């Protein structure tokens, strides 16, 4: 079964703190995506990770990919309120454009 | 670039009525996807097209749902007859559909309420 597990599902963190969201996927893939969704809005692409060991950073967010462990992480550094949103990871299988999405991690950053 | 365009943005209808959702993908994109998002079931892929041809419709809930893509710049998702359990946000997304990086770009969504 093609499946993505994210944890935690909910994350409430204080501004200035660091935390990591984990994404495990069920089958071999070398393409992993992270999206952000603000409440009532659409999904916005954050990162595309295309190979084992890939690391990408944008501002306070850093994503990495370990294809052997079938694990991707999204690390948040010194969180700020503007990062409050739901974060989804997704992977694609070979020879298809289809993405399998995780359930999402709802992040709330408070002062 | 205008991004993926969806219409209407909001639709309220009564049970039994026909509903048609519309999508214009990003120009030059070869793949188009229809998703449904609810609190209970999360984000579900309903169907996707590549070069206007349906590739995978295994997520379409039942025969009441149908999707078409008559040309590269337009797709519809139709529900007939609609039921209250169809209430959800429906997203359309498009991608280049190339090997290596097929990031999907999502439209703003259509919020459907079936009374």
Image (cartoon, coloured by chain):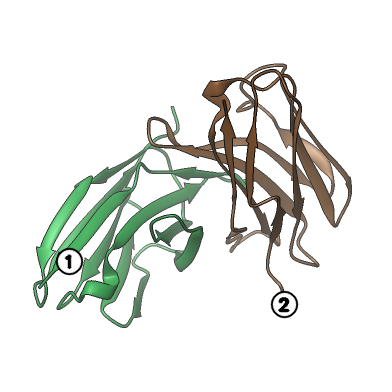
Q: Does A28 sit above or below residue A51? A: above
**Residue plotted at (85% across, 57% down):** B73
**Residue plotted at (65% across, 25% down):** B14
Q: Is residue B16 left or right of residue B54?
A: left
**Residue plotted at (10% across, 78% down):** A16
Dot 1: chain letter: A
Q: Chain B, which colour?
A: brown
Q: Dot 1: within a 10 Å radius of its alpha carbon, few (fewer than 14), some, or many (20 or more) residues?
A: some
**CB atoms of marks 2 and 1 within 8 Å:** no
- Looking at the rendering, which quadrant does residue A58 occupy? bottom left
Q: Identify the mark at residue A109; answer none if there is no mark.
A: 1
Q: Identify the mark at residue B1; answer none if there is no mark.
A: 2
B48 and A81: which is toward the camera: A81
Dot 2: chain letter: B
Whole-percent x, y for residue A22 in the image:
24, 53
Q: Dot 2: within a 10 Å radius of its alpha carbon, few (fewer than 14), some, or many (20 or more) residues?
A: few
Of the 4 image quadrants, the one containing the N terminus of chain A is top left
- Looking at the rendering, which quadrant does residue B102 occupy? bottom right
Q: Does B39 sit above or below residue A83? A: above
Q: Chain A, which colour?
A: green
Residue farthest to the right, as pictured: B70
Q: Secondary structure under badge 1? A: strand
A41 and B114: which is toward the camera: B114
Q: Identify the mark at residue B106; answer none if there is no mark.
A: none
Residue B87 makes an appearance in the image: yes
Whole-percent x, y for residue A59 in the image:
31, 83
Whole-percent x, y for residue B33 in the image:
66, 46
- Looking at the rendering, which quadrant does residue B30 occupy? bottom right
CA distance separating discs 2 and 1: 32 Å
């Amino acid at each position: 079964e093609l499946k993505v597990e994210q944890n935690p599902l909910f994350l409430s963190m204080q501004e200035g703190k660091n935390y990591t969201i984990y994404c495990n996927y069920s089958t071999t893939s070398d393409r992993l995506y992270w999206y952000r969704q603000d409440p009532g809005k659409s999904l916005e692409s954050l990162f595309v990770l295309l190979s084992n060991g890939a690391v990408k950073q944008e501002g306070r967010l850093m994503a990495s990919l370990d294809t052997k462990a079938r694990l991707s992480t999204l690390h948040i550094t010194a969180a700020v309120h503007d990062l409050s949103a739901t974060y989804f990871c997704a992977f694609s299988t070979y020879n298809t454009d289809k993405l399998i999405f995780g359930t999402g991690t709802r992040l709330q950053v408070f002062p | 670039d205008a991004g993926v365009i969806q219409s209407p943005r909001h639709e309220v209808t009564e049970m039994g009525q026909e509903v048609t959702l519309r999508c214009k993908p990003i120009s030059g994109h070869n793949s188009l996807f229809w998703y449904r998002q609810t609190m209970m079931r999360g984000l579900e892929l309903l169907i996707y097209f590549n070069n206007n041809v349906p590739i995978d419709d295994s997520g379409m809930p039942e025969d009441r749902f149908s999707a078409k893509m008559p040309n590269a710049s337009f797709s519809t998702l139709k529900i007939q007859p609609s039921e209250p359990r169809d209430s959800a946000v429906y997203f359309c997304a498009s991608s280049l559909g190339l090997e290596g990086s097929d990031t999907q770009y999502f439209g703003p969504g259509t919020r459907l309420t079936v009374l």
